[in-house]
Amino acid sequence: TWRDSVAELVGRARRVGVSANRNVAPFASLVKMKILRGLQAGTEWTLGYGPRDVGAASIDLPLYESGLPNQCFRLIPKGEDVVLKVAESAMGRVLVNGIEVENALLESGDRIDIGDTQIKISFDAGGTRGP
């Protein structure tokens, strides 16, 4: 019956969800991501913990521009730093300050480009990083 199908799907999702280890940790300072250009221009996200996924199919931080990969990049807390790790599907398409990267330590004022979307990174002035 449909109930059996739903119960099976829920059981499978729980097993997969439990086995996924994301090592959730706080960022040393709040990370602010402001979309400067693109379909979502003016949108601002404030992040307190990570890792956080950004991409077209992300339920975390979705980008609505057509043609973008399902996962573009991940923001990962690492001590006092924020590491940007580009997803395999977005290799060669993510630029930080105009330079193609695979990984980058982000600084306040950095700009991330993917497709026609540009995102400016800043850190909360109340934390250990400057504005």
Image (spheres, rainbow, N blue to C red):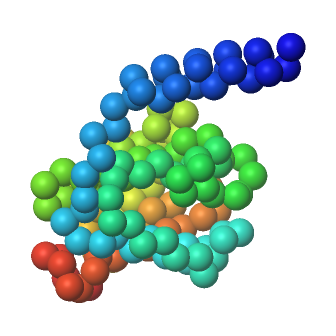
Q: Is residue 68 above or below residue 18?
A: below
Q: How many numbered circles does the render carry?
A: 0
Outermost residue, right direction? 1
Q: In this view of the protein, which residue sits in the foreground, 60 or 5?
A: 5
Counting from the top left corner in percent of width and height, residue 104 is at 28, 52
Task: Name which residue lies at 25% across and 62% down.
Answer: 27
Q: Is residue 58 shown to the viewer in this render?
A: yes
Where does the C terminus fall, quadrant-wise? bottom left
State left or right for residue 46 relative to residue 25.
Answer: right
Which residue corresponds to the image point at 64% horizontal and 48% vertical from the top-left? 56
Q: Nearer the viewer, residue 22 or 32?
A: 22
Give the side of residue 8 with respect to residue 129, left or right: right
Q: Position of residue 111 (x, y in %)?
A: 42, 69
Rendered image quadrant of residue 19: top left
| Quadrant position of residue 32 | bottom left
Left or right: where does residue 120 sit relative to residue 1? Answer: left
Report the residue at 58% width, 47% height from top. Answer: 58
Residue 37 position within the rendered picture, expressed as x and y whole percent measured from the top left:
61, 74
On the picture, is 75 further left or further right than 33? Answer: left
**Is residue 98 among what the camera can see?**
no
Quarter occupied by the N terminus: top right
In the rendered image, the vertical position of residue 50 relative to residue 90, given as above or below: below
Q: Residue at x 64, y 62 (%)?
A: 116
Location of residue 122 with respect to 54 vertically, above or below: below
Q: Position of residue 34 (x, y in %)?
A: 49, 75
Q: Relative to 75, say whether 12 is above or below.
A: above
